[in-house]
Image (cartoon, grey):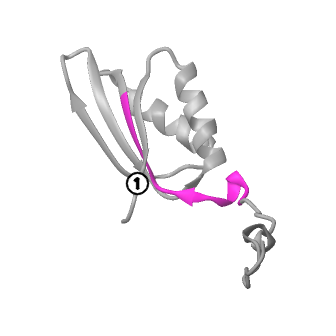
Amino acid sequence: MKGQSAKAFNEYSRELVLAKPEDVKSNYYFSILAPDSKGQVLHLAEIFNAEDISFKQILQEGTDGEKARVVIITHAVSKTQLENVTAKLKEVAEFDLLNTFKVLGD
């Protein structure tokens, strides 16, 4: 354009390099409805352990005597680990994955 002294906006563009999913790590919150019976928390721990995910906090709240809500906050995990554990939890008929959220802050 005539009279323009600055460079055109698109001249400042550069290639954007995205982080790999396995390199982006955060703590996550899981809310899971599980049978309120012996061994269910162990089963959850085995699923998370298979993806090398450790628990920062875990809480189990009984609801109606048949189901319990289990809340898990993990230590930092990658997006790849998150996707894998979420898929595994959805495969187990006894568990109902209610919510998964990224934990902001600490």
Count every numbered label the image shows and give the total.
Answer: 1
Residue 59: x and y, percent?
28, 42
Q: Is residue 41 magenta?
A: no
Give the left or right position of residue 20, taking residue 45 as reference. Answer: right
Give the left or right position of residue 46, taking residue 68 as reference. Answer: right
User: Is residue 76 depicted above or below 2 in this figure?
Assistant: above
The quadrant of the image that shows the C terminus is: bottom left
User: Is residue 66 depicted above or below 45 in this figure?
Assistant: above
Give me the residue at 55% from left, 49% from top: 53
User: Is residue 69 depicted above or below 58 in this figure?
Assistant: above
Residue 34: x and y, percent?
36, 23
Write down the quadrant of residue 41 in the picture: top left
| SS assignment at label 1 | loop
Write down the quadrant of residue 3 in the picture: bottom right
Q: Is residue 25 magenta?
A: yes
Mark 1: few, some, or many residues within 10 Å (few <14, many ≥20)? some
Q: Amino acid at mark 1?
A: Val
Give the left or right position of residue 3, taking residue 97 as reference. Answer: right
Residue 33: x and y, percent?
35, 25
Q: Residue furthest front?
A: 2
User: Is residue 18 depicted above or below 91 in this figure?
Assistant: below
Q: Residue furthest bottom?
A: 5
Write down the quadrant of residue 67 in the picture: top left
Residue span colored magenta: 19-32
Give me the residue at 78% from left, 72% from top: 1
* Residue of label 1: 103
Question: Residue 23 versus residue 61: which sits nearer the camera?
Answer: 23
